[in-house]
Image (cartoon, helix red, strand yellow):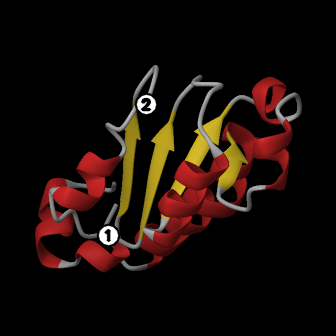
Amino acid sequence: MPSRNHYDGNPMDCIIFTVKRTLRERWRQIVTEGTRGLGFYLATIDESISTKQLGEMRDNRIHLVIPASIKNRIETYTTALNVITYEEFFRHHLDPAVTRWRANGII
């Protein structure tokens, strides 16, 4: 986000958002494909991501975006700083980026 053209010219100002119902090891595709961007956001309903995997995601600037009902129920998710709810994603990550993109005439 916000567009492919903007990503091609300024990837560090873009948000990479992808959705996977379950992750397994597929989250590593973001890292191995050489994707560039300010931050990576992986939305899922997967409830079985380990502390180790969350740490590896954090080290690679990947945020896990999950429903609040899942985050509040799974202890591993409540303590991981890179696990955020959809509400947190919109409020703290997407909304500020949209404001910046509008101010700069990108959108």
The N terminus sits in image quarter:
bottom left
- Residue 69 image position (x, y, % from top left): 82, 24
Q: Position of residue 59 (x, y in %)?
A: 50, 71
Q: Please identify the quarter of the rendering in which residue 11 is found.
A: bottom left
Which residue is at 64% across, 50% downward? 89
Residue at x 59% of width, y 23% of height: 45
Q: Is residue 46 left or right of residue 12?
A: right
Q: Is residue 59 above or below residue 80?
A: below
Say which element carries label 1. Answer: loop
Give the label on residue 76, or none.
Answer: none
Mark 1 is on which residue type? Gly
> Helix, strand or loop at disc 2?
loop
Q: Quadrant of the C terminus?
A: bottom left
The residue at 46%/20% (across/down) is 21
Point out which mark residue 37 bears. Answer: 1
**Closer to the N terminus: mark 1 or mark 2?**
2
Q: Which residue is mark 2?
A: 23
Does residue 9 appear to the left or right of 73 in the view shown? left
